[in-house]
Amino acid sequence: MADIAFLSSKPSFSPLRLQDRSLGWQAGAVVLGTLFLALSSYIEVPMVPVPVTMQTFAVTLIGALYGWRLGAVTIAAWLVEGAVGFPVLAGGSAGVQHFVGPTGGYLFAFPITGALVGWLAERGWNGNRVVLAFAAMLLGNLACLVLGTMWLAVMIGTEKAITFGFLPFLVGGLLKSALGAATLKLFSGYKPEPTDLRPQE
């Protein structure tokens, strides 16, 4: 007797399919995600008052691959690690002081950024549609810059905050968004036709 295998007409937003995995798998993904975020923090170009790192690339990619809920949880876990003293923040730094200084707004914006990109990915702005994936990454980078600059403006004034905390990072955000979208496309690979029906013995 033969079965008919019906392939899903709505492909998963992420090739990792973490939304279908057990809690053990998801916990492991959180641990690996925090390690990836920590490694991205070591890729740094010193600038004043905020350094350029690959953190936003990692944050947006985690959001897109994990989804908005698990992505935000993973990013928050990484921030907690940094706050309690693990050297996982920019340049291997750590400590609560980074959350109340010039970089605080950007750090607090990271879970929001990851959740935004994850929410968009779940709605089709993912590696299956590379242009939309790029747009989602770009929106995430812009959200992080805007929130971080607003925090910085309270400390050094609006004009200086825009000059030193927003404008210098626009080109980097654009490039990291393109890299993020390309990475998602590579992860996605080839998908079977949704209408394909194959008899199986």
Image (cartoon, grey):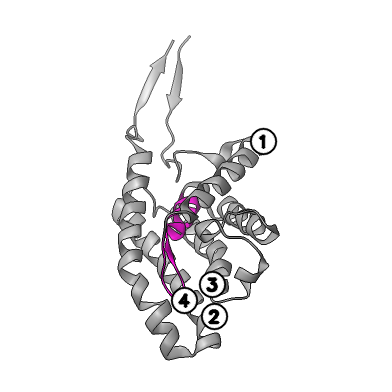
Of callouts 4 and 1, which one flags the residue occurring earlier in the amino acid sequence? 1
- CA separation in Å, label 2 and label 4: 12 Å
Tell which tag, 4 or 1, sits nearer the viewer. 4
Q: Are marks 3 and 2 in contact (CB under 8 Å)?
A: no
To which residue does mark 3 refer? 103
Tag 3: amino acid: Thr
Residue 2: percent from left, percent from top: 45, 12
Q: Are marks 4 and 3 in contact (CB under 8 Å)?
A: yes
Residue 70: percent from left, percent from top: 59, 50
Q: Is residue 47 magenta?
A: yes
Tell which tag, 2 or 4, sits nearer the viewer. 4
Of callouts 3 and 2, which one flags the residue occurring earlier in the amino acid sequence? 3
- CA separation in Å, label 4 and label 3: 8 Å
Tag 1: amino acid: Gly
The residues colored magenta run 45-64
Front residue of 149 and 193? 149
Mark 3 crowdedness (10 Å alpha carbons): few <14, some 14-19, many ≥20: many
Identify the residue at image location x=37%, y=40%.
188
Which element type, helix, strand or loop, lies under badge 3? loop
Of callouts 2 and 1, which one flags the residue occurring earlier in the amino acid sequence? 1
Note whether 7 is above or below 93 in the view shown: above
Tell which tag, 4 or 3, sits nearer the viewer. 4
Of callouts 2 and 4, which one flags the residue occurring earlier in the amino acid sequence? 4
- CA separation in Å, label 3 and label 2: 8 Å
Front residue of 164 and 61? 164
Note whether 65 is above or below 106 in the view shown: above
Identify the residue at image location x=44%, y=73%.
145
